[in-house]
Image (cartoon, grey):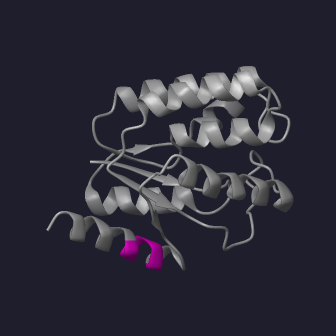
Amino acid sequence: MRITIIGAHGVGKTTLSKKLSEQLNLPVIHDVVVEAFQKGFEINETTPFETQFWLFAKQLEVEKNTINFVADKCLIDYSVYADVLFDDDRVKSLLSEMIKKNIRYDYVFYLPIEFTIEDDGIRSTNIEFQKKVDERYLELIRDWSIDHTILTGSVEDRLSQAMAKIANSNS
């Protein structure tokens, strides 16, 4: 089973992915942005194309080498952030095409903005940037006709909704 949690930074993807991982006994594919930050890559509103491409390539490698997982970041994220960050249509088109060819998820759970961004020292706390990213997620979900489930409420509510969706799909 391949599950991904999508949504703007700071919406609770990591927290929910850990909870789902525990419930379903699946490994978590952690956010490679943390690894990029630790390696000295520039992250957020000023992320250059080279960083975005490295993030995409690393995510692709991890997803291709993991059969079943819960991911708190996935290939879809890199198309969204490229669209928000870059003006170069050639770059955005190239990334989108590579991503479309490689996305394979059984469940896509979208988390809307519901809480204040916690400052983890890595991600942007700029609310306007977060809103812009969230808007692009909604556009991409529509444009690519991505089958998804919106999860809302507390962490427990979201976990319950996700588990119900999975249980209903398997019955």
Where 84 falls versus 128 (above or below)? above
Counting from the top left corner in percent of width and height, residue 87 is at: 83, 31
Given residues 133 and 163, the one toward you in this image is: 133
Image quadrant for the C terminus? bottom left
The span picked out in magenta is 157-161
Where 2 falls versus 164 (above or below)? above
Where 5 falls versus 54 (above or below)? below
Q: Which residue occupies 61% across, 32% down?
A: 35
Where 111 falls versus 96 (above or below)? below
Counting from the top left corner in percent of width and height, residue 166 is at: 27, 64
Q: Is residue 5 magenta?
A: no
Report the number of discs.
0
Q: Which residue occupies 54% across, 79% down?
A: 153
Q: Residue 125 occupies which quadrant of the picture?
A: bottom right
**Taking 36 as reference, is 119 left or right?**
right
Q: How would you classify the magenta stretch by its main secondary structure? A: helix
Counting from the top left corner in percent of width and height, residue 68 is at: 28, 42
Q: Which residue occupies 47% across, 51% down?
A: 145
Q: Is residue 160 magenta?
A: yes
Counting from the top left corner in percent of width and height, residue 134 is at: 69, 58
**Taking 25 as reference, is 43 left or right?**
right
Residue 39 visible to an observer of this rendering: no
Residue 5 visible to an observer of this rendering: yes
**Taking 137 as reference, is 6 left or right?**
left
Q: Residue 126 occupies which quadrant of the picture?
A: bottom right
